[in-house]
Amino acid sequence: MATRIIFFMALGLTSIESTYAENIQTVKISYITQQQKVPPALSNLDAFIQNKGMMGAKIAINDNNTTGQFTGQKFELNTIIVPVDGDVVHVFKQQVTADISFVISNLPVQQLKQLADLDLAKDKLFFDATTIDDELRNSQCRNNVLHLLPSRAMRADALAQYMMKKRWSKWFLVTGMTRQDQLYGQALKRAANRFGIKIVAEKQWTHTYDARRTASSDVPVFTQGVDYDVLVVADEQGLFGEYFEYRTWIPRPVIGTQGLVATAWHKTHEQWGAVQMQNRFKMLAGRRMQEQDYAAYLAARSIGEAVVRTKSNQMQTVKDYLMGNEFALQGYKGKPLSFRAWNGQLRQPVLLAAARSLVATAPIEGFLHPKTDLDTLGFDFPESSCNRKGGSGNMPPPVAENVDAEDIKAKVEKVIQQLTDYYNTQWK
């Protein structure tokens, strides 16, 4: 008798498992990257990491599937690594099939735009886990691309806010010769103008030889004759910026791409559960988490959060939820993260870190915004030139075109004067 009961119980469990397997919802995600040529070593301290970002996506998929066991959903990650000299577009067409709606991209700006503009990509949602380009979030924005890393403008604004808090308002700006350095320099100048900081000097580092050998003599001469509070460096490749600290003519701190840096993630970050994430990543990947790992993790977790909440694996349903007011993602930064409807940028605090310490987290207290202080970093809606056609309908209310800031200022001053006159005549 007992044997029969056990047999029928096992039969019942098998039937339940079979029914569950039939009803499970599968979510397919592609992660695409391209192998990079190993660059010349600028320092033996930092080993070159190939395929940064991939492990972050894998860990997030595991987290999604842990939740999916209880919600009837399964997440599958299709990893695509294009060879160094491979054709990214050709590989994408071959391997990203029609049933894959979500693509995590670890590609440069130009290649990402090529993929997003393909006819077969119109029904896919791209999660940009690599670029920090401001134009890709403004005039060159794509309706089917969301951005996970803070833009250059967000990073520059974060630095400027902290400098205003410290009252270090006189900047000496040094930029490199690459296009990326020039773009970061533009973001720094925009931030300075935005927060009332004065750039007292601006120079370009044009030395073509190895700065490690001659920095002690070149840097003092290069920085001589300028009175400033802080030296601001735009050197995204790290070709010369590291060698300014302790070598300037007058003793001043260094910020920008070296010294005090603005970043999405940093090895010194330990608050709000970050230390557990740091340890878990290091145990599984055998190295420290980088910005691209964090961005890819957020991308896959965003998909997981939206799919669980909407109970749908359809691209448009997921996208509408991601761009809506209900979406909130925990990112180990103390505040829920969300996407800006006007340009697809992920709102998030920006870490300000030195080599071995976390100095501050922006937005800095005291910088206010009518909706969220996270929108004090980067391009707010009135400043954005992005036209996301076919958006989710969640766009902020339109503002009048060709608004004259001086005209608005004059009108505000006039109203203030009228109120003052009324107070003087009626209440004194």
Image (spheres, grey):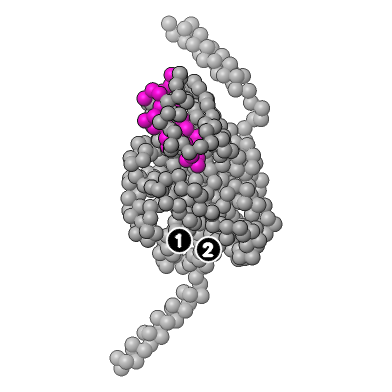
Local packing at callout 2 (Cα closer than 10 Å; few below 14, some 14-19, many 20+) is: some
Which residue ends up furthest to the right in the rendered image? 119
Q: Provide residue 65's location: percent of width, then percent of height.
A: 44, 64
Identify whether 272 is placed above or below 124.
above
Which residue is at a point 42% across and 45% down the rendered structure image? Answer: 43
**Magenta stretch: includes residue 236:** yes
* Element under disc 1: helix
Q: Magenta residues?
A: 227-251
Residue linked to disc 2 = 79
Amino acid type, mark 1: Lys
Q: Which residue is mark 1?
A: 58
Discs 1, 2 touching: Cβ within 8 Å: yes
- Write the residue at 54% across / 54% down: 36
Answer above or below: position of 421 versus 155.
Answer: above
Q: Amino acid at mark 2?
A: Thr
Asked which secondary structure carries label 2, the reply is strand
Comes first in the chain, label 1 or label 2 = 1
